[in-house]
Amino acid sequence: MTNTIGDIEDADVILVTGSNTTENHPVLSSYVKRAVKFKNTRLIVIDPRRIKLTEFSDIWLRPNLGTDVAWINGLMHVIISENRHDREFIETRTTDFDALKDMVEKFTPDYVESITGIPARQLIEAARLYASANAGSILYCMGITQHTTGTDNVKSLANLAMLCGNLGIPGSGVNPLRGQNNVQGACDMGGLPNVYTGYQKVTDEAARKKMEKAWAVSNLPDQIGLTVTQMVPMAHDGDIKAMYIIGENPLVSDPDLNHAEKSFNNLDFLVVQDIFMTETTQLADVVLPAACFAEKDGTFSNTERRVQRVRKALEAPGSAKNDWEITAEIAKRMGYDMIYADSREIFEEIARVTPSYGGITYDRIDSAGIHWPCPTEDHPGTPILHTQQFTHGKGVFHAIDYIPPAEQTDDEYPLYLTTGRVLYHYHTGTMTRRTEGLNDRVPESFVEISAADADKYNLKDGEETKIASRRGEIIAKLKISEKAVAGSVFIPFHFAEAAANRLTNSALDPVSKIPEYKVCTVKLSKAG
Amino acid sequence: MDDQKIIIINGNSFSFTPGETILTVAQRNHIDIPTLCYLKGTTPTGACRICVVEVKNARNLLPACSTPVESNMEVQTESREVIESRRMSLQLLLASGNHNCAVRESDGQSWTAFQLNVQHQDNSGDLCPVWGDCELQSLAYRYQVSGETFPATKNRYPMETVNPFIIRDFSRCILCGRCVQACNEVQVNNAISIGYRGTAAKIIAAGDRPLKDSDCVFCGECIQACPVGALVEKDARYDWRPWSNRKVRSTCSYCGVGCQLDFHVHDNRIVKISGAEGTPPNYGSLCVKGRFGFNFIHSEDRLKTPLIRETGRENGKFRQASWDEALDLTARRLSEIKEKNGPDSIGVLTSARVTNEDNYAAMKFTRAVLKTNNIDHCARL
């Protein structure tokens, strides 16, 4: 997030898109709801599903799946043509405005309506409302990013925020809501193929030299590595021979699971470190037992870049160890000593090699976390990014055209499928499905459909239904719901026995390599 | 002029900002005014009258939580009249339900009869489940009052136990309304309200249906707000007492909000999780997963020893192994494959679920030991 969670209540207008906030980030959603209920903040929700937050919204736009660039360009078209953009911000803080202006020229409300299904009048209203804000906050989540145009979608939201000067002040910003407790930290720590900690590039010689010195090694690799979505097909083709997987369950969370399963089976060696047997450990050659979060000391970095303490409350079961200890033991056996007394010592090393974490210490974050960047020990941290200038000086407008999703409905697969989570479960369910109460609330998978579509395909509420895509098929209970829009169905991806990802498309965004989980096409029929 | 914005509390002068209440000014200056129905950050309801104070020239005692400060106001927070009023309020509350926390006088017979009746209704031989962790009990002790000054009122509503998370014990509800404020003004789930009138009043959900059939999303904000034993975690009820627990502050492991929480640890088990009050980003709030989704930690299914595959991948048979054997095998196979097929034939998936320190170790291992940049995690998935 460019801004903080607390900041949300300072916004005049909040635009939420591609985020079912009340189910996926419940505590953060209460900031949005409080702002609307008690602070006269106006709320725009842009989401095909009738999510809970629509009950709080002033304007709810319901675009067709995968048409985000079109409606965002449409909003900008209206704002520019009605002269509602922030000229001073554009002049002093940004470049390439003219290219953007030329691109959005054709995205008239009528044209946008023809692509997105959003009535032209509603689009105009939303544009006027967002542009009217002194501080406008954009909140988004995987509904924006999990598309073949995910990068385009995010850049388009950044365009919209810059166009109205909604960056760098309290209550503003472009705010991705991160779905996993430490997904921010995993990225910050260089758990990515192209960067070391703090986004220092592996292709930058100075960064490589610095790391070589810090780690007392030579010849660190200078080529960008592979993403998970590239490794899996390469395992399939035999180019990746071995994998070391820590605390992940790609055999439920990856797209096109049937293909992924073959890929993992094809590995010469697979070692998986986890707290439970999972669909992925089942295929491993070696399984290593790890301590869970309540059994370890360390830090997580949350969605607002706040580095916070994790503290050990329990002894781990059996002989399970800290993840870092296990990794260090393997390193030692491969001839490299990675000896640390405790997690604090590792954090001190992180701070030494990572400018944005340089001023953070366990002592400083003992009672409340600190937002990075925090370069020195006397620096208070940075709750709001880009207050004076952007990371690279001026903000660049990207002129982006609309590209439809990779898969389109046809006579054989007439319905769109989108996937996500429900309130009571988390990701692949290895944790939440082991809590009786949560299982009691949502015990099994379901396919959410509109009453109109259920009628059209002659399906009844509660009946076992077969859902098939070009890649696989699953069976789940039909759930007729007001949340669903005609033409689209929704399936949560928590349930391995009816894994939504047997259906999803592994088509990737060309830049971020994110799969298009949020749009593919399916057909429904009675099971059995 | 600044010197006009002065209030005198118990003879001492304090400055204030217009719009502040007597309670806010007192709390800021560490003057203790007891409260029951007041929930920080929400609109004061003034329902319980415990926070009443004496204001010079006012006709009645005024609730500190909802009375705005005026210039030169003179306030007494523990005058004789104030104390008498609080004692009366507490006695009425204590008489209104199953407050079997031993704040009764020493007439053995009536104490026993009352106690047996309550224990029968509780289906337990123990005292109140929040004994020792109850604001009403603390106040009764502080003001030395007991429960039989007024005749006990009849307990109208049966306990609700039909949802997996929260016990609603109406016999201990003092109708302070804090749960309603928590639900409507903090989490804004708008699931509960005060229903019926007068002595029939009750906290209701969805026209008086069980929580599981209402808009309730089981965030448990109401439990944390409840000052008495009316709302209790189902799993925690009677299993332990607060003084036998150790509290450990940590960060939630579900979504990316990073809520601060307190583990309540008893005998190497987590018996309860509560939101850490007064600290960002959540200021005490949690969701259903963060508050109740911790049973997995103690699951029998947890991996406890390293495992090594015995047979082919088709039938997934494993045998237990020592750490040395498992680590040696892992190191040997990774070294062989690196040697034979090159570093880039190996891929590492680190995790968005583990700590920064764990991720850093995995990253360093991949680059410095395996010598590849093939490292990623499920940020995209």
Image (cartoon, coloured by chain):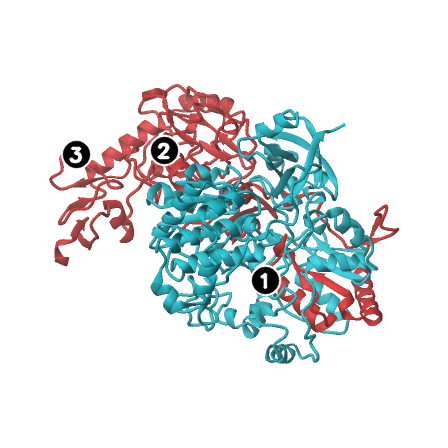
Q: Tag on residue B79?
A: none
Q: Which mark is residue B60?
A: 3
Is residue A512 visible in this depiction of the protein? yes
Does A463 sit left or right of B336 as displayed? left
Label 1: chain? A
Instruction: Note the chain letter of the red one.
Output: B
Tag 3–tag 1 contact (CB < 8 Å): no
Q: Nearer the viewer's eye, disc 2 or disc 3?
A: 2
Same chain for mark 2 and mark 3? The answer is yes
Read off the residue under disc 2: B177
Chain colored cyan? A
Image quarter (top left, top right, bottom left or bottom right) of the C terminus of chain A: top right
- In the drawing, does residue A74 fall left or right of residue A344? left
In the picture of the structure, the residue carrying the numbered disc 1 is A187
The residue tagged with tag 1: helix, strand or loop?
helix
Question: Can I make out residue B286 in this image?
Answer: no
Q: Secondary structure at mark 2?
A: loop
